[in-house]
Amino acid sequence: MSMDEAKTGRIIQGIGGYYTVVDGEETHICRARGNFRARNITPMVGDYVEYLPSTDEKEGYITDIIDRKNHLMRPMVANIDMLIIVIAPESPKPDLNLVDILLINAEKIGADVCLAVNKADLNKKEAKKTTDMYRHLNKRFIISAKSKKGIRKFEKAIEGKTICFAGQSAVGKSSILNRLLPGVDLVTGELSAKTQRGKHTTRQANLLKYGDGYVVDSPGFSMLELEIEDPNNIKDYYPDFRQHSQGCKFAGCLHYSEPDCAVIEAVEHGKIDKDRHERYKKIFEQMNERWKKRYG
Ligand SMILES: Nc1nc2c(ncn2[C@@H]2O[C@H](COP(=O)(O)OP(=O)(O)OP(=O)(O)O)[C@@H](O)[C@H]2O)c(=O)[nH]1
Ligand SMILES: [Mg+2]
Ligand SMILES: [Zn+2]
């Protein structure tokens, strides 16, 4: 093979414009060709790429990005089959709005989802409350990376060629992965004593081999905003609302405060969690404001 012939590999990490491309047993540090910027695309972890391998004399180059099946902007990762949303009942205080937005984003890109309530050793009751709130999800787990409780069952249920972990800082994403990947020793970090929030220990997305596929550890975050879109579409990303919306009186019902809304009735009858519906209304209102500001 001539050195100029492009090969294909997968990006497992990107730091400061240098991407680690893995191709079978080989690993190459590559830069991205300038034409990506012109085309307004950034290579990301999970991308399959064409690249020119590095040699002793010159660094490697990514020459093309193979069409993505899907991608997320936060965490920034491409070609994922399942998003595992990790949350803790306490330490840090759970941000369920963040869970809802991650669920919306996963729904938008057609990725399977799994909810993992970690740190169950700290507060079992609250952990159970959280899984109950998301009872429409097929895959919900109460686990503890510390005591290993529930890990075996969780491990059996997660599947897909590429699985991505996401959630607030310090909920235990890296700690769970250390349980799933013997021999891998990801750095984990305490909460800040002062703020009781995570310290953002994991600094960049990291794609690791897992069984026949891959798993991505990603940095925790707290603020997450939806990409701007017609606020009337948001309801469509709630599978638990869709189960009932056939019964709404009005076609295009937003399940906000309309009369004879079957979703609101389901909330009143305890079939949909009340707080989840309240958060939906807030998410809708915020998007409505942003939409009006831009187009109104
Ligand atoms: N009590 C308890 N502590 C845990 C558990 N899992 C993780 N921790 C602790 O929680 C802290 C944060 O864990 P990490 O694995 O670093 O959390 P992370 O989600 O990867 O955080 P970022 O990388 O900052 O996004 C560490 O001190 C862990 O030891 C658990 O199941 N129970
Ligand atoms: Mg981490
Ligand atoms: Zn309705």
Image: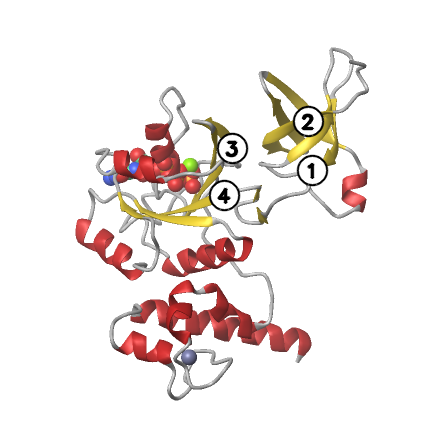
Circle 3 crowding by C-alpha within 10 Å: few under 14, some 14–19, many from 20 = many
Name above or below for residue 98 compared with residue 243.
above
Residue at label 2? Answer: 8
Circle 4 crowding by C-alpha within 10 Å: few under 14, some 14–19, many from 20 = some
Residue type at tag 4: Asp
Is ligand 1 within 8 Å of the beta carbon of the residue shown at mark 4? no
Whichever of callouts 1 and 3 sits on the residue coming sooner in the sequence is 1
Residue 1, visible in the rendered structure: yes
Residue at label 1? Answer: 66
Circle 2 crowding by C-alpha within 10 Å: few under 14, some 14–19, many from 20 = some
Residue type at tag 1: Ile
Q: CA distance from mark 1 to mark 4?
A: 17 Å
Please, what secondary structure does the residue beneath circle 2 have? strand
Q: Which mark is residue 206?
A: 3
Q: Is residue 289 left or right of residue 82?
A: right
In the rendered image, the quadrant that contains the N terminus is: top right
In the rendered image, the quadrant that contains the C terminus is: bottom right
Ligand 3 is found in which quarter of the picture?
bottom left
Whichever of callouts 2 and 3 sits on the residue coming sooner in the sequence is 2
Q: CA distance from mark 4 to mark 3?
A: 16 Å
Q: Which mark is residue 117?
A: none
Rendering coords of residue 207 (x, y %)? 52, 32
Q: Nearer the viewer, residue 129 or 235?
A: 235
